[in-house]
Image (cartoon, rainbow, N blue to C red):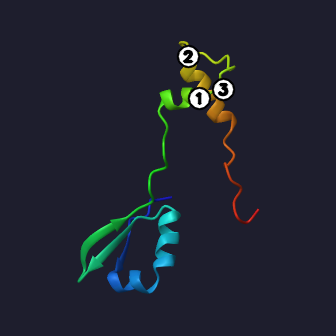
Amino acid sequence: MAAMGPLRVSESDVVRDLDAILLRVQAGVEVVIERDAQPVAVIRAAAPPRRTISECIALMPAESTATIDPEFAQDVEAAITAHREPLEPPAWD
């Protein structure tokens, strides 16, 4: 399936139906807002917040036996792979 290009909309379309535009952005669509057929702004979904390794380590309970050894990256990858379910169930569930 080919990747879709950005959705191009006029200023008046954004003003008229901002909610619909934001729903498209939330679904992963990049939106280019145009004035007189010229791009003025681009709206795309915000990047999810990310934690550094040191922040993750600081969140571990004091009694944790976790260690950062040469296999740490493999352990993290295995944990991520084992938990691919969404953090929050979709609204339709």
Which residue is found at the position 55% from the left and 28% from the top? 58
Q: Please identify the quarter of the rendering in which residue 5 is found.
A: bottom left
Q: Where does label 1 land, which residue?
A: 77
Question: Marks 3 and 1, how far apart in space?
Answer: 21 Å
Label 3 sits on a secondary structure element that is loop
Amino acid type at circle 3 is Pro
Q: Tell me the CA gap for discs 1 and 2.
A: 13 Å
Residue farthest to the front, as pictured: 62
**Horizontal and vertical percent position of residue 28:** 49, 61
Q: Position of residue 35 (x, y in %)?
A: 25, 80
Please name the amino acid that badge 2 sits on: Ile
Q: Secondary structure at mark 1?
A: helix
**On the image, numbered disc 2 is attached to which residue?**
68
Residue 81 location, x and y as percent? Answer: 64, 34
Q: Are marks 3 and 2 in contact (CB under 8 Å)?
A: no
Determine the residue positioned at 40% across, 84% down: 15
Mark 3 Cα shell of 10 Å, populated few (<14), some (14-19), many (≥20): few
Dot 1 amino acid type: Glu
